[in-house]
Image (cartoon, grey):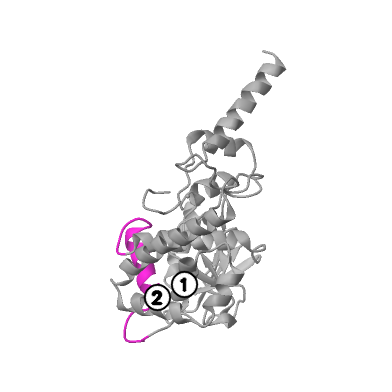
Amino acid sequence: MSTGFLFRGLLFFIICAIQSIESKDGRFCGEVAWTKACSSVSDDDMRRRKRDSDSDLNKDISEEANKNPSFTGAWKMADKDVKLPALIKKYKILRRSEIKLIMAYTYELNQMVAQFYASLNEDCRNFGLNGGNYPKTKKILRNALIKLGDSQTNLPPMLYRKEPDFLLKSYTSWKNQQISRQLLMFTSTSKSKNAFPCNPQGKMQTIFKTPQAGASIADFSGFPGEQEFVIPLMYGTFYVETVDSQKKEAVLVGPTTSSAQALVSNSIPCNDGNGHEYLHVNFELFTLCLVITFKKRINC
């Protein structure tokens, strides 16, 4: 078989893969290494699409916020937060509703009701990404944190978290089984070992070593001194490296993400038919990702 024939075959394969990433009107939507998103669309059209899409996001979040008083309160509070205009100006990669949702996630409101972040994470643990009371909110927040994390500089080499003591038993079991796992909730961590107060259920220290997933939300938080990084729900995998029962400490490696994982995980919002933008990643592109190491992930 000639070299020229092989080259033409490979070129055809790459073209087919790239062409698979397009919106319903045939325009590119997403970014494959060197290709910028929606390059054929005018700036005015892009602003209009972003505004219309944000309106849909706001509607989806508002509908689910009505299911929980603390969520309703946090969502309304974010709309009036004095930081909002500056955050919209600084974080152009995020839509207004995504910024508001990250802010709402950090609030501490009425202590008589469960905080929104606690209610959301309980829903994550019970129903995963797609079910429960907040399926749209979970996907929107997850995608926003992925985009935010991808736009920031490298993560700290270590992230820290206080957890209940009973988790030592779980971490020990996972270490012995030598299995990789995913985080089943939005996981708050800090780049400072002492920034978070002790968990009321225990003083166990969990360390995420060389994480590849997470976003700094200090600018969005009402508690910037916590130096908080949030790891998105079910994004990447980790394994348990060491568990020290005497020190009450567990070291987890990760979460780590491969190029292929990042592509599949990031193919959430370009168009679902209801105004949201969704990315189509077909089998050819996934296969291509296994062959070529992309330096940039697909983002909308």
Which residue in the rendered view is the most extreme toward the right? Answer: 3
Residue 39 location, x and y as percent? Answer: 60, 47
For the N terminus, the image quarter is top right
- Look at 62% across and 61% down and name the residue there: 151
Q: Is residue 2 above or below residue 290?
A: above
Q: Is residue 61 magenta?
A: no
Left or right: 167 in relation to 261: left
User: To which quarter of the image does residue 73 belong?
Assistant: bottom left
The amino acid type, in three-letter code, at marker 2 is Trp
Left or right: 280 in relation to 91: left
Q: Is residue 122 magenta?
A: yes
Which residue in the rendered view is the most extreme toward the top? Answer: 1
Which residue in the rendered view is the most extreme toward the bottom? Answer: 111
**Disc number at residue 140?**
none
Neighbor class of circle 1 (other Cα within 10 Å; few <14, some 14-19, many 20+) is many
Q: Is residue 121 above or below residue 224?
A: above
Residue 243 location, x and y as percent? Answer: 54, 65
Neighbor class of circle 2 (other Cα within 10 Å; few <14, some 14-19, many 20+) is many
Residue 234 location, x and y as percent? Answer: 45, 57
How far apart are labels 1 and 2 at the CA level? 7 Å
Q: Which residue is mark 2?
A: 75
Q: Nearer the viewer, residue 19 or 73?
A: 19
User: Is label 1 in a helix, a strand or a loop?
Assistant: helix
Residue span colored magenta: 110-133
- Look at 53% across and 72% down and name the residue there: 161
User: Is label 2 in a helix, a strand or a loop?
Assistant: helix
Residue 224 location, x and y as percent? Answer: 57, 81
Q: Which residue is mark 1?
A: 100
Q: Is disc 1 in contact with disc 2, using a CB cutoff of under 8 Å?
A: yes
Q: Nearer the viewer, residue 294 or 196?
A: 294
The amino acid type, in three-letter code, at marker 1 is Lys
